[in-house]
Amino acid sequence: MRLALFALGGAIAVGLLTGGRPTRVAEVRFRWPIAGIGGVVLQLIPATGTLGIALLLSSFVLLGLAAGANVRLPGFPLILAGLALNFLVISVNGGMPVTAHALVASGQQETLTDLVEHGGSKHHLATEADDLVVLADAIPLGAPIRQAVSVGDLLAYSGAAWFLVRGMHRRGGVGSAGDPRIVETSP
């Protein structure tokens, strides 16, 4: 979550510093917005066990459908690739493995202790039984983010940041009312 706030906040700052306006993002025509919203909502439901994993995988399916429907927009190919990688790791392992090294190196010792003692349906401490751990939450990000992230997370948030910066430079009235293209303004 901290990476999301950092990436999206940074993208908005870059967009503003380069003359963009946040209101221009609202002009973008998204396809399948309900699928995207539904995918986010499913990730927020505090379920455990098999239901928790089913909701998590369902959320990635909905988010993937929304990203795929908008793949022509800037950044969405990266978002789609990131979602696909995370879906793959979660589906193969019954949740997202998190390496102990990434937790300790990112300053999240308390999270390591919690995963060891309680586990979780969405995240679990990586073991030798897990597959594709290189794609799991194995990348430590130190201060100010202090989070263990996956390759998929980095791709998805990079795509979202790219989209925001480009979207803040969108010109009104490009093409027809349904035209999803984003065109940068000239300086």
Image (cartoon, rainbow, N blue to C red):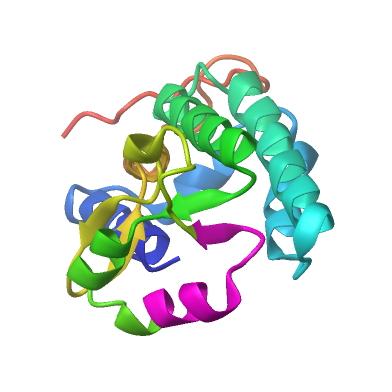
Screen quadrant of the C terminus: top left
Is residue 150 visible to us here? Answer: yes
Tell me: residue 45, above or below residue 183. below
Q: Residue furthest bottom?
A: 110
Q: Using residue 61 as the reference point, say whether residue 187 is left or right of it.
A: left
Residue at 41% across, 45% down: 128
Q: Is residue 150 magenta?
A: no
Q: Position of residue 79 (x, y in %)?
A: 46, 33
Q: Is residue 162 visible?
A: no
Which residue does the image show at 76% across and 65% down from the upper left? 48
Residue 113 placed where, x, y %? 42, 81
Quadrant placement of the N terminus: bottom left
How many numbered marks have been drawn onto this rendered protein structure? 0
Q: Which residues are magenta?
A: 111-124
Taking the image as shown, residue 84 lies to the left or right of residue 149, namely right
Where's residue 173, x and y in %?
53, 27
Q: Position of residue 71 (x, y in %)?
A: 53, 19
- Find the residue positioned furthest to the right: 51
Q: Quadrant of residue 5?
A: bottom left
Q: Residue furthest front?
A: 128
The answer to which quarter of the image holds residue 35 is top right
Q: Is residue 142 left or right of residue 51?
A: left
Q: Is residue 178 above or below residue 85?
A: above
> Foreground residue, 40 or 74?
40
Does 115 lie within the magenta span?
A: yes
Res 170 → quadrant: top left
Residue displayed at 30% across by 52% down: 11
